[in-house]
Image (tube, rainbow, N blue to C red):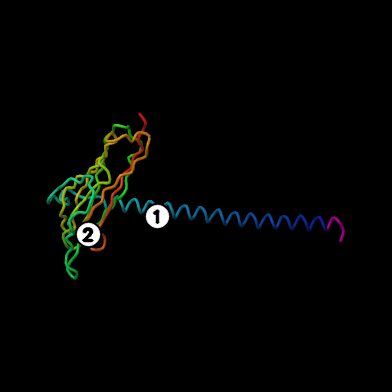
Amino acid sequence: MNSVTYRKQQVERRRQQDQRKSTVSLVIGVAGVLLLVVGVYFYIQQEAGAEAATEYTAADVAHEAPFVAEHEMGAGPPIPFLPAGEAQPRIAVPETRYDFGRIGPQDVVERTFVVRNEGQAPLTISRAYTTCGCTIAEFSASVIPPGKVATVRVVFDAGFHDTAGQTVRRGIIIENNDPNQSQAEIWVQAAVNLK
């Protein structure tokens, strides 16, 4: 075999290797784009579903026994579960987290959440409390009929304590008579500026 033939074979091998590498790179690139598109699609569907689940009319809002949840410690009253085998309530909290973003050290911010009863019996909130005194939650009702909602207006006061320069996360704990989820939670957070 002469050197020219050998050289041609080497060039052809390199060309084939480069072509295989290009094909593999193309396949990986296409797979990556497909994964990204599928991920974006499911994210949009999830966001649209959460938004639809938080939609309600004034007629949907329950107003029986409204109350304000504050920070408290210790055990609450017993949860009034319904007898097994009977119709049961089912709690749904479509939006469980909200980020207020950057706020001032003395700002008071608020967000309204929805607690929905998707069950067949009245949903009773036996107790709700916040994880800190800087946060309160105003419930439109403590008893939510099937198919109805209670609104929960959460108010966070950044000036309640010195939280400047910190990211603060606070929760609202909702104890209720859903036998499958007797405790639901809503969380808010804010990045509190120094000034």
Look at the image and say whether residue 2 sits in the magenta stretch: yes
Camera-nearest residue between 147 and 22: 147
Judging from the image, what secondary structure is the residue with disc 1 in?
A: helix
Q: Which residue is mark 2?
A: 118
Q: Give the distance between the C-alpha atoms of the residues marked 2 and 1, in whole angstroms.
A: 24 Å
- Kind of residue at badge 2: Glu
From this viewpoint, which residue is outermost toward the right?
2
Q: Residues within 10 Å of mark 2 (few under 14, many from 20)?
A: some
50 vs 25, left or right, is left
Quarter of the figure with the N terminus: bottom right
Q: Is residue 108 above or below residue 95?
A: above
Q: Residues within 10 Å of mark 1 (few under 14, many from 20)?
A: few
Q: Which residue is mark 1?
A: 42
The span shown in magenta is 1-5
Look at the image and say whether residue 127 sits in the magenta stretch: no
Can you tell which of label 2 and label 1 is closer to the viewer?
A: 2
Residue 123: which disc? none
Based on the displayed image, in which of its 4 quarters is residue 68 positioned? top left
Quarter of the figure with the C terminus: top left
From this viewpoint, which residue is outermost toward the top?
195
Question: Going 27% across and 46% down the picture, which residue do you hit?
Answer: 131
From this viewpoint, which residue is outermost toward the left?
64
Based on the displayed image, in which of its 4 quarters is residue 27 positioned? bottom right
Question: Going 71% across and 55% down the picture, which residue do you hit?
Answer: 15
Based on the displayed image, in which of its 4 quarters is residue 7 positioned? bottom right
44 vs 52, left or right, is right
Judging from the image, what secondary structure is the residue with disc 2 in?
A: loop
Measured from the top left, where is residue 164 in percent x and y?
35, 33
147 vs 40, left or right, is left
Q: Is residue 163 above or below residue 9?
A: above
Are the residues at dot 2 and dot 1 in contact (C-beta closer than 8 Å)?
A: no
Measured from the top left, where is residue 189 in percent x and y?
33, 42
